[in-house]
Image (spheres, rainbow, N blue to C red):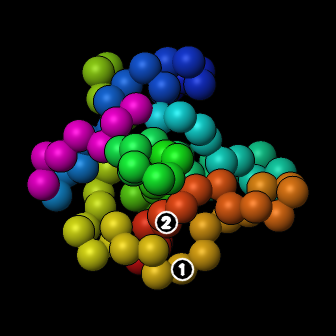
Amino acid sequence: MDITYNELRSKEVINVTDGRRLGRICDIVISSENCVIKGIVVPQERKVFRSKDDLYIPWTQVKRIGDDCILVYVTSKQFECNSTPPKNPKGKHFCDYIIDED
């Protein structure tokens, strides 16, 4: 199955562990070495004195891509930022939160 970025970003990302809607994809992280998708980035709620917090979900956590939504497996403890997200070429992190791969 081939899918474009525009088709991916139009789909709702849903967590299968609790049924929560996480939002729509705002970015995709691709390895520059072997052109493999490393993960997706989903924007989170806006804070009062802070810009958007983005949630990085490793590609291994994506379980199914359907016609209307993308199902991911994320546990509640994985929402804590307990490891370093991937960095962009300028050395900055792609997002504020990362979900560790198991």
Residue neighbourhood size for the residue with mark 1, other residues' Cα within 10 Å, grouped as few (<14), some (14–19), many (≥20): few
Number of other residues with Cα within 10 Å of mark 2, as a class: few under 14, some 14 to 19, many 20 or more = many
Judging from the image, what secondary structure is the residue with disc 1 in? Answer: loop
Residue 25 location (% of width, % of height): 47, 35
In the rendered structure, find residue 83 and report the number of the disc placed on it: 1
Q: Residue at 40%, 44% (x, y): give it.
A: 46
**Residue on which the image places disc 2:** 98
Query: In the rendered view, does 32 fall on the left or right side of 76?
Result: right
Coordinates of residue 69 in the picture (x, y in percent): 30, 29
Is 89 left or right of 48, judged from the image as shown? right
Work out whether mark 2 precedes mark 1 in sequence or the reverse, and give the earlier one: 1
Residue contact between numbered discs 2 and 1, judged by CB atoms under 8 Å: yes
Residue range of the region highlighted in magenta in the rendering: 18-24
The furthest residue to the left: 18
**Residue lying at 48% horizontally and 26% vertically, measured from the top left:** 8
Number of marks in the image? 2
Is residue 6 inside the magenta stretch? no
Residue 92, located in which quarter of the rendered image?
A: bottom right
Name the residue rendered at 65%, 48% in the picture: 29
Amino acid on which disc 1 is placed: Ser
| Quadrant assignment, res 14 | top left
Q: Nearer the viewer, residue 91 or 5?
A: 91
Residue 75 visible (yes or no): yes
Q: Which mark is residue 22?
A: none
Percent position of residue 18, x then y: 12, 54
Q: Name the residue type under label 2.
A: Ile
Distance between the alpha carbons at the discs numbered 2 and 1 = 7 Å
